[in-house]
Image: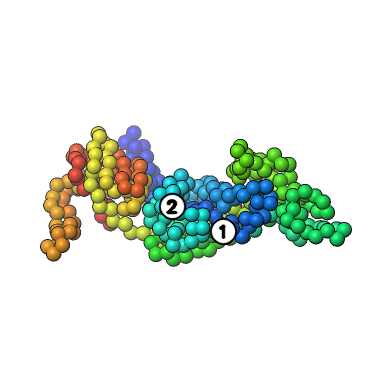
Amino acid sequence: MKKQLFFLVVLLTMTQSAWSQKKRVAVMDFDFGTVQGGVSAIFGQNVDIGKGIADLLVDRLVRDGTYSVIERKAIQKILAEQNFSNSDRADSNSAVKIGKLLGVDAIIIGSITQFGRDDRNVGVGGGVLRGVGSKYGLGNVGVKNAKAVVGISARTVLVETGEILAVASGKGESQRSGTSLFGAGSGSRTAAGGGVDMSSSNFANSIIGEATSAAVDRLRGELSAGATKIPDKVVNVDGLIADVSGNTLIVNVGTRAGVRVGQNLQVVQGGREIRDPATGKVLRRVGTPIGTLVITEADEQSSVGNYNGATKPKVGDQVKSLPK
């Protein structure tokens, strides 16, 4: 029994260690300004396909498992608080600022460069000029069967320096062709409220959805391959316990200070503060390690964790990174 318990602890430690080594990334909504006119023509309204494709990419990255991906709701919250506009989507400086607030290693920004019909397969006869409707598959007057094509480009930006570490692209083409990009009919175009749910099976089963899925899959592959370019970030966590409830501790440092879910921290009790004689700033705290804290929840300013140790911790005790 003891041997089984030992191997279980080792397995959990190895799993936790491997998980914590994943680079944390956030995915911004993609810019689609260059294809916006065509998108409006395709859907009959101005649809935010940049958000839809970002959602699809997040889903693929989470399933892939190479990165630890930030929940999209956290990004939307930061965007609202910082009053960022759609024009900031592909801006590296804005991305770095958002990334620092989220506590991620890198942030992925990108643009949609192609979204519509493959013009090589569009035929127009009888001297009729090729207009917006024919180009984007709206109707079938003088239009032969054509495939859908979607192109996406992305950059991985290091939050700490603003450096572009890697570029990636994905181009997808539908396997099927037709006179309409939706194939299954107009019912595939819209979801409740007149919007477009790009994660729905209706959209995925359409011709344009088929091309979109292929493009996102290829982009995901290139982004995952570039994960090794993100350097390991050394962060020294230094905070204090704000609340004690049994073995559950709340500390006054969060993602802004580099705290991550799954991270192990050291709990230190007592001791004294060493201050700079010129400024009075605390240089370091000297105390006695009494146990460890495994972080289970973290927001920007605080974290929650499970404590393990023989000595009971108290409010004001220090939490810090484990010594190397």
Q: Up-down: is 157 above or below 321?
A: below
Q: Up-down: is 226 above or below 308?
A: below
Pick whichever of labels 1 and 2 is earlier in the sequence: 2
Determine whether the residue tagged by mark 1 lies in a helix, strand or loop. Answer: strand
Q: Are marks 1 and 2 in contact (CB under 8 Å)?
A: no
Q: Position of residue 70 (x, y in %)?
A: 44, 48
Q: Position of residue 322 (x, y in %)?
A: 27, 52
The disc labelled 1 sits on which kind of residue? Ser
Determine whether the residue tagged by mark 2 lies in a helix, strand or loop. Answer: loop
- 250 displayed left or right of 205: left
Identify the image quadrant of the N terminus.
top left
- Tell me the distance, in whole angstroms, between the alpha carbons under discs 1 and 2: 21 Å
- 311 displayed left or right of 36: left
Q: How is the image coloured?
A: rainbow
The disc labelled 2 sits on which kind of residue? Asn
Number of disc labels: 2
Residue carrying label 2: 83
Residue furthest to the right: 126
Residue carrying label 1: 111
Does residue 192 appear in the picture of this structure? Answer: yes
Q: Nearer the viewer, residue 47 or 158?
A: 47
The residue located at (25%, 34%) in the rendering is 245
Q: Position of residue 152 (x, y in %)?
A: 60, 58
In this rendering, the label closer to the viewer, 1 or 2: 2
Classify 10 Å Cα crowding around label 1: few (below 14), some (14-19), many (20 and above): many
Q: Position of residue 22 (x, y in %)?
A: 42, 52
